[in-house]
């Protein structure tokens, strides 16, 4: 990350409650301009509430929040002029055409007629909606509606965009098309705060990731840093016969063997140096393998380890407190 970049979003001790239910319990964030920051966590963790506060749609009960240097409470109008929001549910008007939806947003952004026409033409081209521009939005596929929704967000040329689960319900091809658009926006200097239920999406897109659970920030770092917090990486060696398996088991004494499958699971962090060392050991002891596979923890593993899973069996307590990472972890 470029150290000369400035913070685009900063929160300090951000708090929000509804009656006795604490939704945000002192959230500290610093999101650098021109990056993608993913906010992850279970349902009800506080992700959408955070987005609503930062986009001035909801007041916080305590703490400070700034977007591009503007306080979200005292300078709400300045914040709104510089941001765009694409929520969980599409803001597209089904009765209007794609072009008419964009014209509506241009009017709301107070663009003059000529500037509005140019901006709309550019967005229709950028989002591959030109052929469908004059068709009712009700006829659009899910992927087209989400592209139109994001295009509407961009009419005012925002420098910070909040994407609250932008690809929910999309097929894999449409989701990847959205990823391409999001990456292109960041390449142009836009800052994006992303919430998503798709852990792969965060892994593919985000420069940094933070996990929320019960209103608290429990871990933050790059995807790579967070995955290194979780043990369990290994290399599976597959052998053609029992003799090869026996030889390898003598070499890798900490490994777990499966005689039925003729495989050996060797603990490893999956790094190139570790793999090279493993292969050197095999070569030194003249051990031939029929194949190997590398498994490293992914963000799904991080999610489960950090947030835990409640035991839903009747009469049984929540086992989360015993899960690794239940206490605050940090990869900063």
Image (spheres, rainbow, N blue to C red):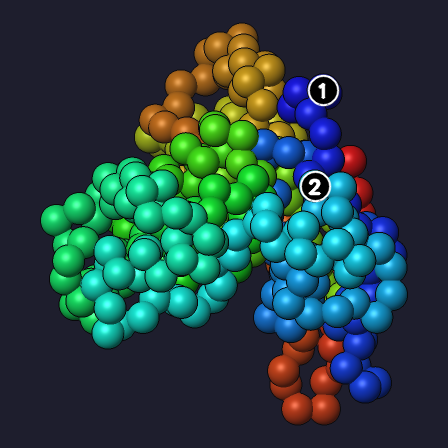
Residue 234 tag number: none
Residue 115's x, y, as percent?
36, 41
Disc with the residue nearer the chain's start (2 vs 1): 1
Question: Which of the image's four quarters has the C terminus?
Answer: top right
Q: Foreground residue, 153 or 316?
A: 153
Query: In the rendered image of this protein, does residue 213 appear above or below residue 119?
Result: below
Q: On the picture, is 146 further left or further right than 7? A: left
Residue appearing at x 40%, y 62% in the figure: 168
Residue appearing at x 32%, y 56% in the figure: 103
Q: Foreground residue, 131 or 11?
A: 131
Residue appearing at x 72%, y 29% in the figure: 6
**Label 2: which secondary element:** loop
**Label 1: which secondary element:** loop
Residue 4 tag number: 1
Q: Foreground residue, 15 or 274?
A: 15
Which picture quadrant has residue 96?
bottom left
Q: On the picture, is 110 further left or further right than 227? A: left
For the question of whether residue 18 can be seen, the reply is yes
Question: Which of the image's four quarters has the N terminus?
Answer: top right
Which picture quadrant has residue 102?
bottom left
Residue 97's x, y, as percent?
21, 63
Q: On the picture, is 250 further left or further right than 115? A: right
Which residue is labeled 2 in the image? 68
Residue 110's x, y, as percent?
46, 53
Residue 306's x, y, as percent?
71, 56
For the question of whether residue 326 can be seen, the reply is no
Q: Is disc 1 surrounded by few (<14), some (14 to 19) or many (20+) residues within 10 Å?
A: few
């Amino acid at each position: 990350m470029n150290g000369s970049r400035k913070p685009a979003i900063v929160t300090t001790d951000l708090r929000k409650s509804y009656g006795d239910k604490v939704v945000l319990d002192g959230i500290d964030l610093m999101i650098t301009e021109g990056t993608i920051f993913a906010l992850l966590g279970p349902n009800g963790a506080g992700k959408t509430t955070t987005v609503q506060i930062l986009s001035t749609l909801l007041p916080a009960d305590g703490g400070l929040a700034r977007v591009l240097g503007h306080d979200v409470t005292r300078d709400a109008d300045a914040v709104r002029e510089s941001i765009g929001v694409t929520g969980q549910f599409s803001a597209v008007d089904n009765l209007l055409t794609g072009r008419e939806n964009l014209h509506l947003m241009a009017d709301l952004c107070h663009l003059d007629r000529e500037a509005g026409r140019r901006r709309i033409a550019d967005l229709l081209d950028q989002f591959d909606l030109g052929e469908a521009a004059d068709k009712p939005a009700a006829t659009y596929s899910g992927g087209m509606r989400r592209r139109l929704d994001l295009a509407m967000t961009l009419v005012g040329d925002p420098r910070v965009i909040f994407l609250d689960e932008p690809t929910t319900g999309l097929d894999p091809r449409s989701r990847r098309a959205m990823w391409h658009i999001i990456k292109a926006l960041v390449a142009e200097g836009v800052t994006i705060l992303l919430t998503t239920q798709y852990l792969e999406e965060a892994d593919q897109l985000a420069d940094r990731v933070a996990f929320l659970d019960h209103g608290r920030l429990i871990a933050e770092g790059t995807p790579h840093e967070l995955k290194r917090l979780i043990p369990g990486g290994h290399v599976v060696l597959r052998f053609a016969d029992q003799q090869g398996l026996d030889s390898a088991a003598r070499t890798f004494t900490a490994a777990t063997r499966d005689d039925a499958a003729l495989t050996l699971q060797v603990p490893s962090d999956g790094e190139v140096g570790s793999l090279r060392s493993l292969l050197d050991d095999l070569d030194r002891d003249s051990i031939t393998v029929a194949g190997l596979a590398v498994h490293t923890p992914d963000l799904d593993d991080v999610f489960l380890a950090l947030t835990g899973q409640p035991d839903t069996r009747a009469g049984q307590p929540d086992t989360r407190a015993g899960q690794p990472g239940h206490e605050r972890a940090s990869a900063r």
